[in-house]
Image (spheres, grey):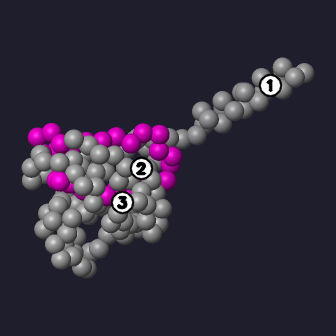
Amino acid sequence: MKKLISVLFLLLLFNYSYSQESYSLALKVTDLRNSTGVVVFALYNKDGSIPDEKLKKCYKKEFVAITRNSATVTFDNLPKGNYAVFVLHDENKNNKIDKKFILPTEGIGFSNFQIINLSNRPSFSKASFLINENLIKNIKIIYK
C-alpha cells in the first residue's frame, strides 16, 4: 500500500510540474550607437515596478555583451502572465542609469515604446504585454 501511495504521489507531482505552462521570451536591440559597454535587459512582472531607476524591482535581469551594435537575450521558463521590459545601454558598465540633469545620457528602451517624453512616460501598464506563447520582441533604444 505504501508503494502504491508513493507511486501515485510521484505521478501527481510529475503531472503537476509537466502541466505548468512556461514560455521563452527572446529580446533583441539593434542600432546601438556603439559597441561599448553592455546591455542590461530587465524583465518585470508586477504592476508598479517601473520606472525602476536602480534596477532593483525586476523579476529577472541579464547583462549582455554587445556585438556589432546589437545584443540579444532569451529569458526561459517564464510562467504565463503580463511582463514589461526595460533595456539600458550601459556604456560605462556601472549598472545604473547615468543622467545629466534629469535626462539619461545612455540609451534606454521599454517594451511597447518608440518614444519617451513627459507626455509619454513609461509605466508597467503601458509597457506590459501578455506571454502565453514563446515570443520574440525587438526593443527600440532611445538616446537623448
Q: Residue at x 26, y 43 (%)?
A: 64
Q: Is residue 65 above or below residue 42?
A: above
Horizontal side, residue 11 vs residue 141: left or right: right
Residue numbers of the magenta segment: 66-92
- Mark 2 to mark 1: distance in Å? 35 Å
Q: Residue at x 35, y 63 (%)?
A: 54
Label whose residue precedes the other's in the sequence (3 or 2)? 3
Q: What quarter of the picture does the C terminus occupy?
A: bottom left
Q: Amino acid at mark 3?
A: Leu
Label 1 Cα neighbours within 10 Å, binned few <14 / some 14-19 / many ≥20: few
Q: Amino acid at mark 1?
A: Ser
Label whose residue precedes the other's in the sequence (2 or 1)? 1
In which image quadrant can residue 133 be found? top left
Q: Nearer the viewer, mark 3 or mark 2?
A: 3
Which mark is on residue 6? 1
Which mark is on residue 60? 2
Q: Amino acid at mark 2?
A: Lys
Give yes or no for residue 67 being in the magenta stretch. Answer: yes
Residue indicated by mark 3: 55
Q: Position of residue 37 (x, y in %)?
A: 17, 48
Q: Residue at x 47, y 40 (%)?
A: 77
Characterize the magenta stretch by its predominant secondary structure: strand
